[in-house]
Image: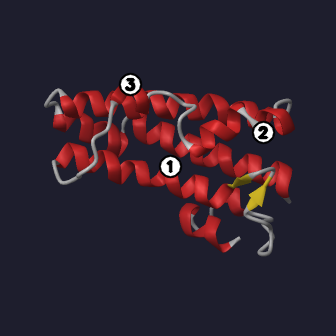
Amino acid sequence: MSWWKSIFGANDKETEGLKEDAGEEIGGLNFKTALEAHIKWKMRLLGVVDGTGSEVLDPRIISQDNQCVLGKWLYGQGNRDFGSNAEFKELVTAHTNFHKCAGHVLDLALDGKTEDARQEIEGGAYARASLATSRHLMRLWRSIGI
């Protein structure tokens, strides 16, 4: 699927065997939209770190993994339909960690520790959690959708 390849790269092993016409929406979740929303978090957080963003973000809310569209799906229909799927369980764990890391980055930025926040975004725990969430989302999509 070209939209996955645009994110992970055409030669990434995660994209092997993808059908170009595989559906983006499965089980009540648009996987492409969910992935794009999580990728946008980097820009949202950088806006706070740089002082260029206009959003007011609360680290207590951001740290919760059940407030975004993906989180609501994971704890709702996704859990009902795919809760026993091993990759689903991995995604829940990765997604929870992602939100904890995003909240931590926001705490750092709001405390004036902008260099520490930037390091987390660019190559620290946040960056790793973001990649893990994206990869587990793709793996779940592959296991249930194609």
Answer yes or no: is residue 54 visible. Answer: yes
* Residue carrying label 2: 77
* Residue carrying label 3: 60
Q: Residue at x 58, y 35 (%)?
A: 95
Element marked by disc 3: helix
Task: Give percent across and percent down for residue 10.
Answer: 61, 70
Marked residue nearer the N-terminal end (2 or 3): 3
Residue 61 placement, left or right of 47: right
Task: Give percent across and percent down for residue 41.
Answer: 41, 48
Q: Residues within 10 Å of mark 2 (few under 14, many from 20)?
A: some
- Looking at numbered disc 1 in the image, what kind of residue is underneath it? His
Q: Nearer the viewer, residue 17 or 45?
A: 45
Task: Give percent across and percent down for residue 110.
Answer: 20, 31
Task: Give percent across and percent down for residue 113.
Answer: 16, 30
Element marked by disc 2: helix
Instruction: State which mark lies toward you, 3 or 1.
Output: 3
* Residue carrying label 1: 38
Tally the numbered discs.
Answer: 3
Alpha carbon separation for disc pair 3 and 1:
17 Å
User: Is residue 41 depicted above or below 105 in this figure?
Assistant: below
